[in-house]
Image (cartoon, rainbow, N blue to C red):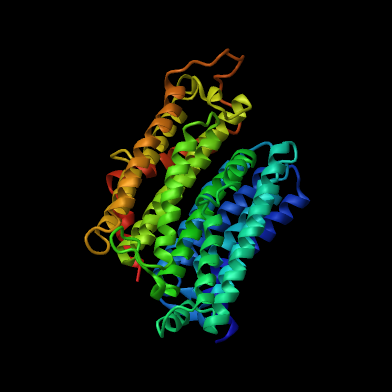
Amino acid sequence: MSYLNLLKLGAPEAIVVLIALAVLTIGLTNDRARGLPGVVAAFGILIAIWTTARLPQQASLFGGMLVISPLNSLFKMICLGLAFVTVPLAVSEKSLRNPGEYLAMLLLGTLGLLLLVGSEELLMIFIGLELLGLSLYVMAAFDKTDVRSAEAGLKYYLFGSTASAFTLFGISLVYGMSGTTSLALITLKLGMGPIQPLMAVGIVMTLIGFAFKIAAAPFHLWAPDAYQGAPVPSSAFIASGSKVAAFVVLGKIVLIGFAPAHGNAGWHMMQPGWSPILAALAAFSILLGNFVALAQTNVRRLLAYSAVAHAGYTLLGLVAGGRDGFSATLFYTTIYAITLIGAFGVVGMVKRETGGDDFQNFAGLASRRPLAAGCMAIFMLSLAGLPPLAGFFGKFYLFSAAFRSGGNHGLLWLVVLALFGSFVSLYYYLSVLKVIFVDQPPAAEPGQGRTAAGQFLPLATIVILAAAILILGVLPGTLAAVITKSVP
């Protein structure tokens, strides 16, 4: 293959790199033009999305290191779209004193997402994980005026490094036992005979590494401090883009590479494999995430423990397996990512106005910012899974796929547990809305109800995201059909 064809197939990644360098240069040479790096970054991301849409239907380079397929192209565009809506939140965040450098890190993290989503080879997946992780560590610790940001970055770095060590050690064992790092060849090797003990250890360690990335209990300990202490745009991107890419890659690894080691998580015919491991992670995440979220008084910390529970819900589709299960996982994680960016956008507005993001800071938001309060209600009710919002159809799609999988409804125990967790979550989501719409602020501050400068752009982004949740709730097939069609 010529270098020209290689550049054509890798054009989205090349464009993101060039835009990251351009944004960094602008930020370092022109401190006064705060909005210019954001405009350049947003324009570059749109070009990358357009380029991704024009990629061929099928192509594979270097044994699966770069794979072009409808599924990969779709989720490249979704990851780029999530980065695009994060840009206005970053530009409006005044505590980020070097927007050019911050947006450059955001774009490099987006490059990591593209490498993750576009590969079916374990070494390239690990490179994408590391590029994404290093960018997110810097983004989490970017606010030098807040000691909690430094703490968030340090904890995220320590736990992320541990996760990377588990992942790399697991990949090395898988490579040692199979002789390849290609997912398609690994599944052929596993199908030739019984699973060897070292291969089983490699599979388990790889799953543990990804459990850290998706914040599944008990590997979630980094999430509350990272979500609460990091700058709000960083928390939004960690909770959305990285989760989408992680679930796409985890689905490929277990459903393509480790498919012969599936096992069975059914209550009546449990068999060893990765399926019962993911089922146990899902059950523990749902219980711990929902019950610990009940005790939170900080909205960002509540969203972090909620993310643990939602990681458990999303794993249901992978446990169910098959085309329907994977499609349900991809649909739900996309809906969840859109909702979380919107919710963190509202949190950022409240934090800029009141100086905090505890429950009391949201008191009276309905009277101060009725539009933002209405959008937050849409996001919270969608996370709770109430119709006719997109979150309801996401959960219905997941739970029905898990219910129908296997014989004799073997995953019924997990579906019942997920329904119970959704019922529990309704309390703390409604608690946030109660504070917003019913409680009054402890003291009225002068000028608190005025529109702050620079709030229009993030508010417009929040409204667009809330409208997307409403539209996908009324017409869920517009996204679900595209995802299902793209899944092989």
| Image quadrant in which the N terminus is located | bottom right
Direction from residue 317 to residue 124 in the image, left or right: right
The x, y position of residue 208, in whole percent, is: 54, 61
Residue drawn at point x = 28 percent, y = 60 percent: 268
Direction from residue 126 to residue 183 in the image, left or right: left
Residue drawn at point x = 50 percent, y = 59 percent: 246
The x, y position of residue 182, in whole percent, is: 51, 79
The x, y position of residue 240, in whole percent, is: 50, 50
Q: Is residue 108 visible?
A: no
Relative to 445, residue 247 above or below: below
Tell which residue pokes out farthest to the left in this image. Answer: 408
* Closer to us: 81 or 145: 145
Residue drawn at point x = 64 percent, y = 64 percent: 165
Direction from residue 111 to residue 305 in the image, left or right: left
Tell which residue pokes out farthest to the right in this image. Answer: 29
Q: Is residue 312 visible?
A: yes
